[in-house]
Amino acid sequence: MKKVSRREFLATGASLTVGTSVFPSIILPRQKRKLGVALVGLGYYSRDLLAPALQLTEHCYLAGVVTGSPEKIAPWQEKYGFPDKNVYNYETMPDVANNPDIDVIYIVLPPSLHMEYSVIAARAGKHVWCEKPMAVTASECQTMIDACNKNKVKLSIGYRMQHEPNTQTIIKWAETKPYGSINLVEAAAGYREGRTDHWKLVKAMGGGAMYDMGVYSLNAARYSTGLEPVAVTARMETSRPEMFSEVDETMHFNLEFPEGVKADCITSFGQSLNRLHVDCQNGWYELQPFQAYSGIQGTTSDGKNLDKSVPNQQAKQMDDDSLAIINKTPVLVPGEEGMRDIRIVEAIYKSAESGSRVTL
């Protein structure tokens, strides 16, 4: 686990005055500056995805880091050029309050640490971006929301799919229903986890397939229908009990929505799964893959292709969230959205453990 801090780009834009005997002076508006982002935690997702994406963004940039691994600092500084004053560790992170270079703190840590470091960031007066799942419990989610509200900063959860164009089409169709009323959603997200010493296998750190990959299936079922579930039935299974002794390897969960709409979902650390299918009264549509880092595409029962794309999903997500801060508009995926999923995740585990249907 690491802590990183960063410095912001200098404000860009200028005033241009053109004066002649014929034309009056013209003053062009100053461009809004880019927001400085500090990544907290320098593991795979920060190193291989977020930091490179921040080289492609238009409205934010990598200004610093928070890390508990001193050996990582020099290589990161050499690659991205942020100064020593924008480097923090977990103990010094509150000092970011005094650093105007940093506007946003992006929490990229195991879920069990999301609440603690989101609250530190909010108290420092910095906007908070937090990776999914938002936290381990709905109570922790509420604490994060309260801290951001109290300190008048924005909180956004890293559901990158809701920023992706083909997914946004699916979300729109939940409202417009071009294929008639929705009957059934099938959502499957998973991969085969082979590491035996990773935090994702540790319950106390927020490990387990349901927290990690399951929120893709769960969130997809919700945004594909535009509805909130009223009940859930779930069961866990594992093919490698020696490896998954603390957490779920595979979770099957069925969601019941109003109007008789249902969702059959699965998530797994033992299978490669990446499909979202929506059955409607007058046809169907699907995305496959629906939660990959690139190449999201789909088809419909009447032969349409869903093949819009963006160069980089993480860059679009961070630019969208930056514009919400700059323009003082609502973020696309606020803390309340992340908390809704975690409330359902808690009910899914309760159902799996009890073997009974749980109402929401």
Image (cartoon, grey):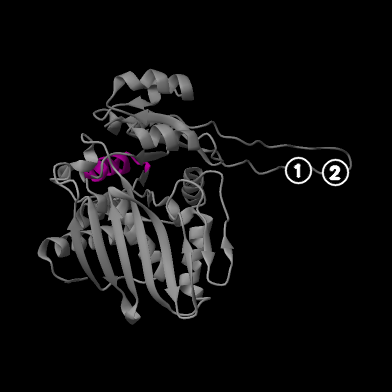
Residue 81 visible at all: no
Assign a secondary structure to mark 1.
Answer: loop
86 in relation to 351, above or below = above
Prevailing secondary structure of the magenta residues? helix
Name the residue rendered at 39%, 52% in the picture.
159
Q: Quadrant of the C terminus?
A: bottom left
Query: Within 10 Å of the Cα at label 2, are there few (<14), some (14-19), or many (20+) other Cα atoms?
Result: few
Question: What is the span of residues highlighted in magenta in the rendered image?
Answer: 112-127
Q: Which residue is at the far right?
A: 22
Q: Which residue is mark 2?
A: 23
Name the mark on residue 323: none
- 272 and 123: which is toward the camera: 272
Mark number, residue 26 = 1
Q: Give amino acid for label 2.
A: Phe
Give 177 or 242, whichever is nearer the viewer. Answer: 242
Residue drawn at x 13%, y 45% as measured from the top left? 245
Number of marks in picture: 2
**Residue 24: x percent and y percent?**
81, 44
What's under tag 1, amino acid-wise? Ile
Identity of the residue drawn at 42% across and 65% down: 277
